[in-house]
Amino acid sequence: MPFEIVTISAAGLELSPVTIGITMAMDEAARSFEAKVKQPGMSQAQLLVALRNSPPCTIRTAASDGVAWGVTAGGNLVLTGHVEKRSPRLGEAEAELAISGRSKTGDVVDSAADHESGEFRDKKAPEVLGALAGKQNVKVESELDHPPRELFRLRPGETIFTAAERWSRAEGFAIGDTPEGNLALRKAGSKRHAGSLTEGRNVRDASAVHDDSKRFGKVKVRAQAPDGYAPDDLQVEDEAGDTQAGRQRLKVIVPPEQIRKKDARKRAQWHRDRAAGEGTTCEVTVTGWRDEGGTLWQPGWLIFAELPSLDVIQDMLIKTIKLDQQGDGEKGYTRATLGLVDPRAFGGKQPKGAKSSVLDLGKIGGDDA
C-alpha cells in the first residue's frame, strides 16, 4: 500500500506526524493542514512551548517505496507557512500534540490592503496584487496573459484577498496558492495528470452531482463605465446565451465595480460558463497521494474520469484536494480525496470524452459572436 514519509519542519524540529491532513484548492488562497505530532525525548508540554508564537514551517513528503521521481532531499514540498494553532490535552497515552496551520498566504487572506493612494491606473493584476501581497512577504505567480486595467481602487478596510477577489471576478481567473507559499493566479490549463480515474480499477469511493439549477438561458451584465458620457459609457450592457439551459430564465449581474462595455460581454460569458461547468461535479477517493506517474495530485490539473455509473466520462479539473494519512503503511491508510469539476467552471474548453462528445452544448464555453 502506498505510504508517504511526511516531515514537518518547524522551530528547529523535524517532526514526523502520526496523523496528517492537508487541504488545498484551485480557488482557495491558503492551503491548510492539521496533524498530530510527537518528538522523541520531548513531552507534550515541551512541544507546546517549542511551537509557540506561530513559527514558520514547511511540509515535505516522499514516497515510501524510495522511488525518487526527481524530488529533492526530503521529498516534495507541499506547504510553506506557519503553525498557527496548538491543541494540547490531558489523558493521552503518548506525548502527541495536535497542531494546525496555513500557508504563508493566510496572511494575505487576513491582512488589510495597505497602499498610500489606494488607487492604481493602467496596471496588470500581478503588478497590483504583487505590491499588496509583498508587504506580507508573499509573491504573486501567474502564467496568464493579463490585460492592464484602467482604474482599480481599494476599498477602506478590505483585505488583500478581498481586493484580489474583486479583480479576479472582473478578469475571470481563480486565486490559489503554491507549495512555496505564494499566490497563484490561474485558469483551467493544459497540465494533466498521468493515468485516469477509472471505476472498478483505482477508485475507492466516488459520488457525483449533476445540477442544472444555476444555469440560465440568458445572462446579462449591466453596469456603468468609470468615466465618459457616450451611450456605451452611461449604459453598459451585454449578454451571453446558454442554448442548453433547458429553461429561458434570465440572470442579471450588476458588478460591484464600474466596467467598460467591452468587459461586460466577457463577464457575462464567465458567469454562463462557470454555471455550466459547476453543473457537473464529482468527489473521488483514491489510495495514495500520487498519480500513476508518481506526481503528487495538483489543484487545477486535468484528469480523465471514467465513471459510467455516475454518468461521468470526460476530462475533469481538480478543484479541491484533501490528503490524509494515519498510522504506518500496515496499520493505517494513505488516501486522497479529489473534488472534480467540469473545466469550463474555470475558463476551460468543453471537455472531450465519450459522453460530452455526443452532447449538443451550443455556444457554451465558446464565443457568442
Image (spheres, helix red, strand yellow):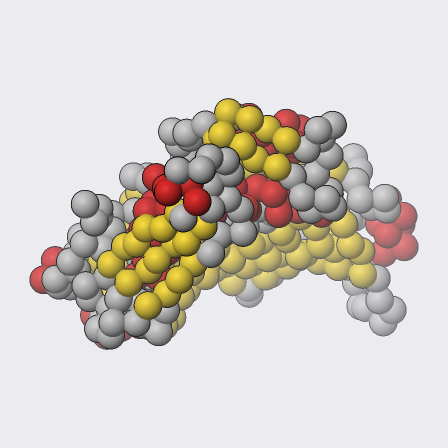
| The one of 143 and 354 positioned closer to us in this rendering | 143
Q: Is residue 122 visible?
A: yes
Closer to us: 15 or 127: 127
Residue under the point 72% across and 44% down: 156
Q: Quadrant of residue 326?
A: bottom right
Q: Residue at x 76, y 50 (%)?
A: 84
Residue 141 pos. (x, y %): 51, 30
Residue 100 horizontal side relative to residue 75, left or right: right
Instruction: Kindly indicate the quadrant of the structure image that contains residue 54.
Output: top right
Res 38 seen here:
no
Q: Residue at x 45, y 50 (%)?
A: 223
Relative to the observer, which residue lies in front, 121 or 164? 121
> As drawn, which residue projects farthest toward the left?
358
Question: Could you tell whether 43 is left or right of 126 in the image?
Answer: right
Q: How many marks?
A: 0
Residue 191 appears at what percent x and percent y? 32, 39
x then y, percent, for residue 124: 49, 28
Q: Quadrant of residue 212?
A: bottom left
Q: From the viewer's perspective, is 66 left or right of 310?
A: right
Q: Position of residue 166 (x, y in %)?
A: 54, 46
Check the picture and name the quadrant holding the N terminus.
Answer: bottom left
Quadrant where the C terminus sits is top left
Left or right, 282 with respect to 93, comes to left
| Front-most of residues 153 and 363 | 153
Which residue lies at the image location 57% right of the left edge and 35% below the top edge?
Answer: 152
